[in-house]
Amino acid sequence: MVHGRRPWGYSSSHPPVGSPPHQGPLGPGVPSTHSPHGGAALSPQEVEFLSSSITQLKVVQTKYVEAKDCLNVLNKSNEGKDLLVPLTSSMYVPGKLSDVERVLIDVGTGYYVEKTADDAREFFKRKIDFLTKQMEKIQPALQEKHAMKQAVVEMMSQKIQQLTALGAAQGATTKA
């Protein structure tokens, strides 16, 4: 062994094997809000990350739903009609609906793919289903984090009440 260096993978924050279970700053049985074991830490950043991930997934899912709904106006009766084509979120140019059978889909990073309207519907359905599954995976983790946070708050409240009662009892005995 090389002196002066710790073995690879060793961390001073992990207790040695056989050491007593971790206890929080409020005593045994009260978990710390930051677990050194890499377990279910209650970091606000992690909860915020999960919440923002779900929000972002919902925004993207809504855009896919809206795009899928826009395909419903592509029918033979609307062919040749005038419409406004968005260039930016606030600027439109006049246009004419010339082909109701084929559409261009933005597949990301500036790439567009030409598809039939039916293929485009299927593409959007797959994307919506994928995003729904991702949100369903994240939601339980977020709920678990909120439940653990609530448990810690309750335990801290109980400990504070116990310490307050103990302090009051000791104060009463010292006065007598």
Image (tube, rainbow, N blue to C red):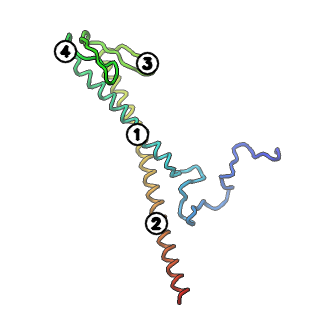
What's the residue at 72%, 42% (across, down)?
A: 8
- Mark 1 lies on residue: 54
The quadrant of the picture occupied by the N terminus is top right
Q: Earlier in the sequence, mark 1 or mark 3?
A: 1
Task: Give the mark nearer the N terminus: 2 vs 1.
Answer: 1
Which amino acid type corresponds to the residue marked 2 in the rendered image? Answer: Ser
Residue 157: assigned label: 2
The residue carrying mark 3 is 110
Marks 1 and 4, the one that precedes in the sequence: 1
- Residue type at the position of mark 1: Ile
Q: Residue at x 33, y 27 (%)?
A: 125
Q: Which residue is mark 4?
A: 78
With 20 as the anchor, is 111 left or right in this view?
left
Element class at badge 3: loop
Query: Where's residue 150, x and y in %?
Result: 43, 58
* Extreme residue in the bottom direction: 176
Expressed as whole percent of the image width and height from the top left, the position of residue 11 reads: 68, 48
